[in-house]
Amino acid sequence: MSAVPVPSAPRPPMLTLAEVGFRYGHKQPWALHHVNLTIPQGSFHLLTGPSGAGKTTLFNLLTLAQMPQAGSLTLMGTDVGTASRAARAALRRNIGVVWQDFRLLPHLTVRENIALPLQLQGPLTATHREAIDQLLDWVGLHPLANRPASSLSGGEQQRTAIARAVVHRPTLLIADEPTGNVDDGMARKILHLFTELHKQGTTIVLATHDTALLQSKQAPVLHLKEGRLLS
């Protein structure tokens, strides 16, 4: 008699937004309103929507750069609205972020920018330096490792920002248009890296307008329009 398969338990949520709203000033329209969303641990979601739809505001909330003005956000089991400053700082250390405007420190070198998330955890070790070197090779920036970020092209800054976001193997990775300033070959390598991180358990939310990427990656797609989540 064959064994009856036991259904796997549902994955707990990485983050949950319940009726979340945010606006920039009391007289301004809501940039996000009545957003309800649950992202399970270990999932991969794509986010799309026209300019001004609220993607940047949503990412600001997911990375704890801003707090919801309505509703609640629970991240890694913690209600961020009631969490202490120390608890929110601990959550941020488990988040990797690729911003569309890179947000590198211009006076630091490529290597130093990539090392920043590791230095927040303590002194750099030989293992850390090896991980940085591997990422520098992977994104093709090893020859530029000691160049200041201010001297890089847009595509080079994008690759540096991606390496910085993933060097500490974050629990949650938030990426805003990570393939927007690179060629098709590098875009495929970036997507491959994100896919490998996902296989290792990283939860990923990736915003993109890249039609080819949307079509090639089999992942749930979240649509934002005028501050509302349509799916």
Image (spheres, grey):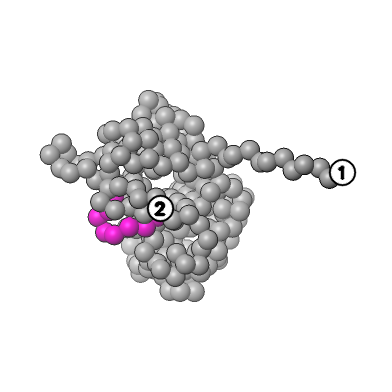
Name which of mark 2 and mark 1 comes first in the sequence: 1
Q: Which residues are magenta?
A: 47-54
Q: Which residue is mark 2?
A: 222
Please tell me which residue is depicted at 33% across the width and 62% down the height of the picture: 150
- Please identify the quarter of the rendering in which residue 80 is found: top left
Decide if residue 141 is in sight here.
no
> Residue at (34%, 48%) from the top-left corner?
229
Name the residue carrying label 1: 1
Give how far across and how far down residue 174 sits, in percent: 43, 50
Query: Label 2: few (<14), some or many (≥20) within 10 Å?
Result: some
Q: CA distance from mark 2 to mark 1?
A: 43 Å
Q: Is residue 129 above or below residue 186?
A: above
**Quadrant hosting residue 64:** top left
Q: Residues within 10 Å of mark 1 (few under 14, many from 20)?
A: few
Secondary structure under tag 1 reads: loop
The residue sitting at the front extreme is: 1
Q: Is residue 167 above or below residue 148?
A: above
Q: Main secondary structure of the magenta part?
A: loop
